[in-house]
Amino acid sequence: MSTFNRTAARKHRQIRVRKRVHGVTERPRLAVYRSNRYIYAQVIDDVQGRTLAAASSQEPAMRSRSLNRETAAEVGRMLAERARAAGVETIVFDRGGNPYHGRVKALAEGAREGGLKF
């Protein structure tokens, strides 16, 4: 009899998503990591192996706020602003094995509001 391992299941989903999602110089990858307390997002060029822009809810301006959908949307808007300053307009979205729901969806919508095209 096997037991359910939540972390292993998320890793399997993450690998399945990464088979199809690959960031290139023209369209880098927006990778999202969500923990119970914080949410992190990076815009990554997989060809060069560089992070072009990053934002998280752990930054000093947002540290006092609890993690909810509004905070995640604000992180998405901050990331979009930084990505556009780095010259990125279009991206591919990597949800990192998380379902496209709740805080991950709010971050994506915040990035769209900030001017990024998915």
Image (spheres, rainbow, N blue to C red):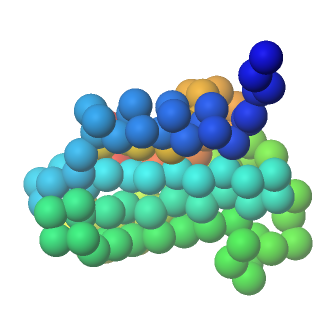
Residue 27 versus residue 82: which sits nearer the camera? 27
Seen in the picture, residue 71 relative to 14 is either above or below; the reply is below
In the figure, residue 40 lies in which quadrant? Answer: bottom right
In the image, residue 71 sits, relative to residue 62, either above or below, namely above
The image quadrant that residue 66 belongs to is bottom right
Query: Could you tell me which quadrant the C terminus lies in?
Result: top left
Give the x, y percent position of residue 14.
Answer: 48, 39
Residue at x-position 52% and y-position 59%: 41
Quarter occupied by residue 19: top left
Instruction: Residue 110: give x, y in percent of width and height.
Output: 54, 46
> Can the viewer see residue 89?
no
Would you say 29 lies left or right of 31 here? left
Q: Residue furthest bottom?
A: 60
**Quadrant containing the N terminus in the rendered view:** top right
Furthest toward the top, the residue is 1
* Residue 37 image position (x, y, % from top left): 82, 58
